[in-house]
Image: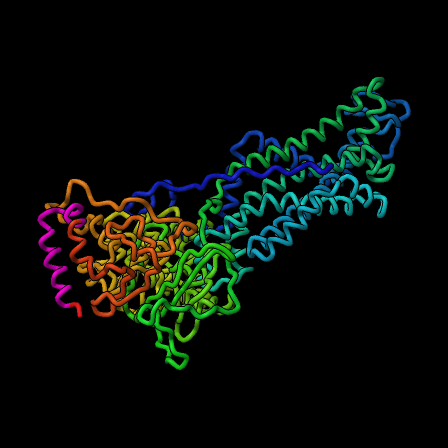
Amino acid sequence: MIPSIAPAPVPATANAEDTGTGEATPASTATGRPGPGPKAAVGRIQAHRLFAAPGAVAGVLWLAALVLASLTAPWWLPYKTEDQDFAAILSGPTAAHWLGTDELGRDLLSRIFAAAAGTLGTSLITVIVGVGLGTVLAMVAAAGKRTEGPISRVTEVMMSLPGTVIILAVIGAVGTNIPVVMAILGVLISAGIYRVMLGQATALQSQLYVDAAKVDGVSTLGISLRHVLPGLNNTIVVQSALIFAVGMLIQAGLAFIGFGPPIPQPSWGGMIQGASQHVYDAPWLMVPTGVVLALTVLAANAIGNALGKAPNAAASHLPSAADRRRRAAASAAAPSTAAAAPSAAPDEPATAGRLSVRGLSVGVDGGTPLVTEVSFDVEQGTVLGLVGESGCGKTMTALSLLGLLPSGVSASGGQILWNGRNLAAAAENELAGVRGREIALISQEPMRALDPMFTVGYQLVSAIRRLRSMGKAEARTEALGLLEKVGIVDAARILTTYPHQISGGMAQRVAIALALAGRPRLLVADEPTTALDVTVQAEILSLLRALVKDTGMSVVMVTHDLGVVADICDTVAVMYAGQVVESGRTANILDNPRHPYTLALLAADPHANTAEDMPERLATINGQVPQPKDWPGGCRFVARCQFAGSACAAPVPLVPSGSDDGLVRCVKADELAVEGLAWVATEVPAHRVPDILEMDSTVEKDRP
């Protein structure tokens, strides 16, 4: 049977130590000079690992000597492969025959090295066909769910076939044509290589930097070649070394049973088969060929093991958006009430730079809903904050704006209206024209959104050239300007560095510069300050405020931090369990919350208290956000709400909250000012209760 191919080990990501100042540590080896290309960097890493292992060095030297000797064999071999010395049949090593002779008196040294070129060359055919075909199939399957199913089924059928029987059948049909036989062997082995490569290719396709490339308008083929293939480089090299050894063994095995090159052409397997006939009367005959074959296989494995330890910075795994399937059409969302989600009239003129989400629902394909009937508006030049605990649907809502929902998840209803187009029903090619140029993304973790295989300059210049159709020199100048615009002083040096050579705050600035490469009108920021320290967080928020003011673009900010909301957001939408439970202007939401969940979030926020006001223990919300499969039919906050009653068992619509154009999803919103005092008194400092009482009483007087 065909030997199974073991998956290569997944190496750890190599990271340089970060000083937190944006400067690379000495380990980063940043010199300020133009850095090498990604292929050169990967090649240098592999060469370092290869020559750092004594076994691998010995393997390289052995294979190099074997190839050189076989290619130059006609010039130095003492005998031709067919020459016979009848006076020295089955002799051991002598001065005339250094490795002895076979049963016909032919020189073993000459025959071994004359057969080496054919054995190594045909084994390479197996490597090229097997690894090449398996890698291509894995990249195609990882690029889309529609292609993965058929390809996986075909490879499963191939793996279930008896490889030895098929090879023997091919030999019966075409004869002992070794190149053809080894190519067929490569096709059979490619199914196993595909399984090895598919997992890594899928993980690479799910990286945030792949989503960033898609936002920048890179085609599926471009993403596969530019971002996925370099990440598979290490595994390809390792598997090639292993398959090379497997090919030699199988080729020797075929020759051993009589299906090798035709007589009198020498082959290692044929020579071993001949030696096996004289294992008792001439045991030495087995030694030279067996040792050479064993050393060659060991050399290939040693090289593969050494290369398998090379760090592959692109092999980090982070579940992220990967699915690119879109519905051909989206049904109009049915609003809960006219006030909650008014439908856009067919003849309503589109406002440039205005985002209007109406009744958006997102769910697992054919299954559980994850977001239901979310509605909000983002006017040009304003910032909307999506607030809530983890698991409330904020990120799903944000990613749906760009069509970057995870695999198996899609928009099941509603509209995402942008410049007169419904993005919820847009095809992939339509979204490609929007991403990067009109709507851009800033991810939560910039170090994951930047491809570690490429320098900052390469990624930024490529994005600018792709999105603005600029020349290389002009794009580099624009890249320097963007880096300076986001507050990077040493922009020329940063262009030459790799993502792991800069700090988290610097990487976030680079990510913002990448998002601005296409001059978008809307920026989707998915918790851009969560992983940063307080000082850098303040700098990033100040930068975003300046960008909104200077460029007039809009921002959808996903965040847990109410302090960030108070600092930068004009409007707020509070989400809980996949729904918007309260929305309105930031000042109204923070000063006069009308939903128990919003009130509880404010009571649990340390920013709401000064150092003198800080209680010994911040307020908490009992329980946790329910899983989508456990959502109740009525109010989804009912299990954690202090004010829940029988009326909360029925579905709760969004209704006007009484403050400007605010909306709230609570049947007791009007009673909260009175009934909430008992809860507030136990969750916030006592001296703040009069202020809350005065605030709520004023609201009740002003309510119509």
Residue 369 at least partly seen: yes
- Furthest residue in direction front, as rendered: 646
Along the horizontal axis of the image, is 691 left or right of 515? Answer: left
Residue 322 at least partly seen: no
Front-most of residues 590 and 239: 590
Along the horizontal axis of the image, is 97 left or right of 701? Answer: right
Task: Report which quarter residue 119 is drawn in.
Answer: top right
Residue 233 pos. (x, y %): 55, 46
Residue 261 pos. (x, y %): 83, 40
In the rendered image, residue 692 lying in the magenta stretch gets the answer yes
The answer to whether 386 is drawn above or below residue 271 in the figure is: below
Residue 20 pos. (x, y %): 29, 45
Q: What secondary structure predominates along the stretch shown in magenta?
A: helix
Q: Which quadrant does the N terminus fall into?
A: top right
Task: Report which quarter residue 649 is drawn in.
Answer: bottom left
Q: Which quadrant does the C terminus fall into?
A: bottom left
Q: Residue at x 43, y 73 (%)?
A: 421
Q: Residue at x 28, y 44 (%)?
A: 622
Along the horizontal axis of the image, is 301 left or right of 311? Answer: right
Along the horizontal axis of the image, is 368 left or right of 529? Answer: right
- Furthest residue in direction right, as rendered: 86
Task: Report which quarter residue 83 is drawn in.
Answer: top right
Q: Residue at x 86, y 40 (%)?
A: 262
Residue 402 pos. (x, y %): 43, 63
In the rendered image, residue 355 lying in the magenta stretch gets the answer no
Residue bounds of the magenta highlight = 679-702
The answer to whether 109 is drawn above or below residue 650 in the figure is: above
